[in-house]
């Protein structure tokens, strides 16, 4: 049993990393204490997440003891949906949370709570729009009913970006709220013409005769899962966050790009699934190297894959729908110092 995935590659300038690292080094020289860090190995790092293939490396690293080898005690709490895990990190029930960009913007709308420091994954063909066989081209979606998880969700944002890419807009289609797990059923019932979903529902729909119209691979960066930390709880634990990210990066690059029987077995046992289900749900998920992490998270970076660029689009959509009115402080919500330090030190 083996597993292979793609690792994205982005070229960045070493000068940019040095620019981020330099103030930290200066703080060390002036203050005499690196980053003013207080490390307390007796305090665990509590991570909240939903079940998703992009978070499998975290599960593997935790269950295999990778974090413990680095002196960290990491525990995982799995939530039913993103709203529950987001509420947990906002209340301080967890220290780190797996979340989407739209969730991040809305969570920090009224007060500064969470800072993103790591991209868990970038979806390729894992997230897809499947529809009726008679929809031969993406442009045939005009005038059709398309399902999304709910208004202003990451699902909604992905479909909006896909429509923009093919020359359509939200006014050209009708949206309907449908859980991703119900898309195949709703297509069969004729209540929708197409819908956003992912495996195993995507595979179920295709097996039933429906077709894939498009995917997140058509709009790179549209669907990214992120790790963010509670800024209040983790303000004195910079080194712990660096170590957390370093271990994740190692598991991403090693355990999931080589035969990964051990990780597959551990993840399957944790989620109480068959190993085949773990393997089937993983293709199409892209992980990033430390250098790529920096290029994506840096709040001053530009380009289609930069979180700042994607956040600007998402904010505009949320503002249009009346959900957000004040643009977030991107320098707060995106913390590139973690990936910059890893790229420079390891």
Image (cartoon, helix red, strand yellow):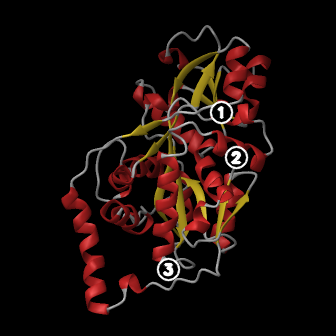
Q: Count neighbours of disc 2 (C-alpha within 10 A) and say few if under 14, some if 14 to 19, many if 20 or more.
A: many
Please say whether residue 103 is visible from this viewpoint. Answer: yes
Q: Is residue 260 left or right of residue 7?
A: right
Residue to which mark 2 is pinned: 267
- C-alpha separation, residue under disc 2 versus residue under disc 1: 10 Å
Please say whether residue 198 is visible from this viewpoint. Answer: no
Q: Count neighbours of disc 1 (C-alpha within 10 A) and say few if under 14, some if 14 to 19, many if 20 or more.
A: some
Could you tell me if the residues under marks 2 and 3 are in contact, i.e. CB atoms within 8 Å? no
Can you tell which of label 2 and label 3 is closer to the viewer? 2
Q: Position of residue 147 (x, y in %)?
A: 65, 31
Label 3: state its secondary structure. Answer: loop
Residue to which mark 3 is pinned: 235
- Which comes before the other along the chain, label 2 or label 3? 3
- Which residue is at a point 69% across and 51% down the rendered structure image? 50
In the rendered image, the quadrant that contains the C terminus is bottom left
The answer to which image quadrant residue 24 occupies is bottom left
Residue to which mark 1 is pinned: 279
Q: Where is residue 176 in the image (x, y as percent from the top left)?
A: 68, 33
Instruction: List the single residue furthest toward the left.
Output: 15
- Which residue is at a point 67% across and 61% down the rendered structure image? 48
Q: In this view, does 294 lie above or below 72?
A: above
Q: Is residue 140 left or right of residue 281?
A: left
Q: In this view, does 166 lie above or below 156?
A: above
Label 2: state its secondary structure. Answer: helix
Q: In this view, does 91 lie to the left or right of 119?
A: right
Can you tell which of label 3 and label 1 is closer to the viewer? 1
């Amino acid at each position: 049993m083996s597993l292979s995935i793609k690792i994205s590659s982005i070229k960045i300038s070493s000068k940019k990393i040095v620019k981020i690292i330099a103030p930290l080094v200066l703080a060390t020289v002036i203050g005499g204490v690196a980053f003013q860090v207080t490390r307390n190995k007796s305090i665990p790092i509590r991570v909240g997440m939903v079940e998703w293939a992009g978070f499998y490396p975290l599960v593997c690293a935790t269950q295999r003891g990778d974090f413990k080898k680095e002196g960290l005690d990491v525990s995982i709490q799995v939530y039913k949906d993103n709203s529950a895990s987001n509420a947990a990190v906002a209340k301080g029930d967890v220290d780190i949370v797996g979340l989407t960009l739209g969730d991040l913007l809305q969570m920090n709308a009224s007060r500064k709570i969470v800072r993103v420091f790591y991209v868990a994954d970038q979806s390729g063909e894992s997230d897809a729009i499947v529809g009726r066989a008679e929809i031969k081209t993406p442009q045939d979606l005009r005038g059709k009913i398309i399902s999304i998880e709910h208004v202003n969700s990451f699902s909604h944002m992905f479909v909006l970006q896909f429509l923009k890419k093919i020359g359509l807009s939200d006014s050209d289609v009708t949206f309907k709220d449908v859980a991703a797990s119900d898309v195949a059923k709703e297509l069969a019932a004729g209540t929708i013409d197409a819908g956003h979903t992912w495996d195993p529902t995507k595979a179920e729909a295709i097996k039933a005769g429906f077709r894939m119209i498009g995917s997140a691979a058509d709009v790179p960066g549209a669907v990214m899962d992120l790790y963010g930390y509670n800024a209040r709880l983790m303000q004195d634990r910079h080194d712990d966050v660096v170590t957390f990210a370093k271990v994740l990066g190692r598991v991403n690059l090693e355990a999931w790009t080589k035969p990964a029987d051990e990780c597959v077995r551990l993840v399957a046992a944790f989620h109480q699934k068959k190993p085949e289900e773990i393997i089937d749900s993983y293709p199409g998920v892209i992980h990033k190297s430390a250098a790529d992490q920096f290029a994506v998270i840096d709040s001053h970076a530009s380009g289609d894959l930069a979180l700042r660029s994607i956040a600007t689009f998402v904010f505009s959509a949320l503002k249009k729908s009346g959900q957000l009115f004040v643009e977030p402080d991107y320098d707060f919500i995106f913390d590139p110092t973690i990936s910059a330090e890893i790229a420079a030190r390891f």
